[in-house]
Amino acid sequence: MLNPGPLRLLSPGLFSTRRDPAGLLVLVLPGGTDDSRKPFSPWQGSALRMYPFTWSLRFRYRRTVRVHQVRYRVYGWNGDESSPMLPARATLDEMCRRHPGVPVVAIGHSMGGRVAAQLAADRRVIGVLALAPWWQHADWRHIQPGARVVAVHGDADERTFAKRTRKGIDELSAQGVDAEFVNVPDGGHAMLDHIGLWQRSALEFVGERLAVVHRK
């Protein structure tokens, strides 16, 4: 049985060759760290953490949604290099090339939440689900105003901070963006607690966005 998780960026196996029309595209964006040029491994914890999201979305929505977990080139953000953004944008462009006109949702954990926010400057991205996001530099300000934004954050997280995430959501809401903050009581950064809540947040968010697309 093929493992759909650890696939190389833009490899032939990454993108489905099925011709069934998709209603929504989903990018799953793993976390990383501040500074590291260590090659990104599909077996590192931040990647493994996101495979259950990827697999559960594929299982739930089958052919109506195309779900792809991004593999970065290196593990770190690396300051002004913004290292994860190049492979993330390349994947976004390739998905949209293969499925023209189909909107995109970005789901990111930690550093992946930062990547998701910056990708959402692109109007093809109609939704951002940020899981314990690393929004250190007010990254929510990149998100285009037409996107729906949900941020889920544990109040016991000591690596990224729920108060800052809530601040970002409050700012987006004040600007008229459809934005919502979901608190996870005693939730930590790794999403190993309240597993059902974290997983449901992705399934429900994608279902909600898919329903909106179908109503149009």
Image (spheres, rainbow, N blue to C red):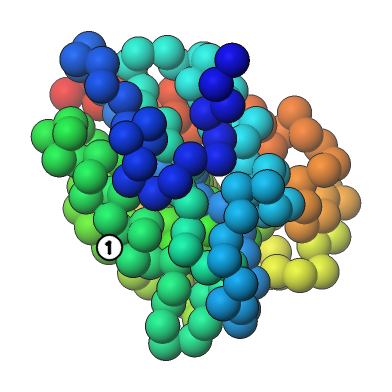
User: Which residue is found at the position 48% from the left and 77% from the top?
Assistant: 138
Where in the figure is residue 39, as x and y percent of width and height?
Answer: 57, 66
- Residue drawn at the location 47% of the way across and 63% of the way down: 73
Where is residue 134 drawn, in percent x and y?
60, 68
The kind of secondary structure element at disc 1 is loop
Q: Name the residue under label 1.
A: 121
Disc 1 residue type (three-letter): Ala
Vertical placement of residue 125 versus 20, above or below: below
Q: Which residue sits at x=19%, y=15%?
A: 19
Residue 7 falls left or right of residue 192:
left
Decide which of 161, 37 is in the foreground and name it.
Answer: 37
Residue 204 seen:
no
Residue 95 % position (x, y): 25, 40
State which quarter of the image contains the N terminus: top right
Other-residue count near label 1 (Cα within 10 Å), few / some / many at <14 / 14–19 / ≥20: some
Q: How many marks?
A: 1
Q: In which quarter of the image is the C terminus?
A: top left
- 121 left or right of 167 in image: left
The correct choice, above or below, for 71 with respect to 157 in the image is above
Any part of residue 34 in sight: yes
Q: Position of residue 182 (x, y in %)?
A: 64, 47
Q: Going 30% across and 40% down the picture, which residue do you hit?
A: 104
